[in-house]
Amino acid sequence: MSLVKEGGSLTYQVPVLTSTNYPLWAVKVKSIMDAHGIWETVEPKTLDKAPDQKKLKQALAFLFQAITEDMVLQMVSYTDPKQMWDGLKTRYLGVDRVRTARIATLKRELESLCIKEDETADNFVTKLSGLTSEVRSLGYELEEADLVKRLLDSIPKLFLQIVASIEQCFKLDSMLFDEAVGRLKAYEEHIRGTEKAEDTQGGLLASDEK
C-alpha cells in the first residue's frame, strides 16, 4: 500500500479494482477504509445503531474511486456502500456455492503445500501467505495457530532441529506466524552460513594439499 505524507498526516493511494486483482484489492481497500473509520458502513460493529449518513456518503465515494470508469457506470444504481461491496464481491467471487468450492480447493492446496529441499523459507512463506490471503478474502478466517502448524508441518529435514526446539520451548497455540517465520529464517541463515564456511574451508584444505 503506497503512503504519501502531506502536511504531517498520511493519505492513502486508492487501489483500483481490475479483472484479476480482487483478493488483494479487497484486503487493501478494507484496510484503508478501516483506517479512515468508514469500514463500519460495510460491516457495522453493532446492528442497533443508526448508520452515520456522512460516513455512508464518504464510503460510497471512496468505493467509486476504487473502481474503473466503466464499472462506475455499472454500479451507479448503488446508494449504499454495503450493497456496492457485496455486489462487487458477488461479481468477482461468484455466488456462495462457487465461493465454497473455491475455499475447499484453496484449503487442499494449503494442506498439500510443502517446502522443497532447495527452496528458501522466504519463497515458501510468500506462497503460503498468498494462499492465506486468498482464502481470507473469500470470508474463511485462518487462525494464527493453524498457519504456524501448517508452516512447521511443511518443512524439510534441514529444519527438523529448529522445529523440535520451537515445539519444546514455545506454546504453538499462542505463537504468531511472523515469529515462527523469523525463527525459521534465522536458523536457515545460520545453516547456509555454516555450509558456506565449510565449503570455503574445504577448498582451502584441498588447495594446501596440492
Image (cartoon, rainbow, N blue to C red):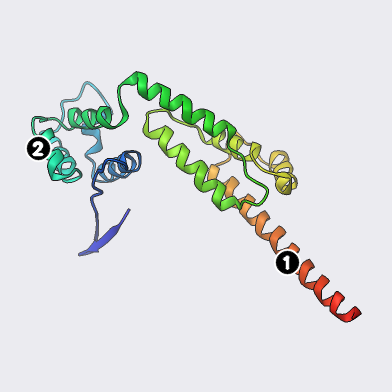
Residue bearing the label numbered 1: 196
CA–CA distance between discs 1 and 2? 59 Å
Quarter of the figure with the C terminus: bottom right
Question: Are dots 1 and 2 in contact, CB under 8 Å?
Answer: no
Is 39 positioned to the left or the right of 198 in the image?
left
49, 61: nearer the viewer: 61
Q: Which secondary structure, mark 1?
A: helix
Is 198 positioned to the left or the right of 115 in the image?
right
The amino acid on which the numbered mark 1 sits, given as a three-letter code, is: Lys
The amino acid on which the numbered mark 2 sits, given as a three-letter code, is: Leu
Image location of residue 74, percent across then percent down: 12, 34
Q: Residue furthest top?
A: 97
Q: Look at 52% across and 41% down and name the residue there.
A: 128
Image location of residue 43, percent across then percent down: 27, 30
The local crowd at label 1, few if under 14, some if 14 to 19, many if 20 or more residues have their Cα within 10 Å, is few
Image location of residue 203, percent across then percent down: 81, 73
Residue 34, by quadrant, is top left
Residue bearing the label numbered 2: 73
Q: Which secondary structure, mark 2?
A: helix
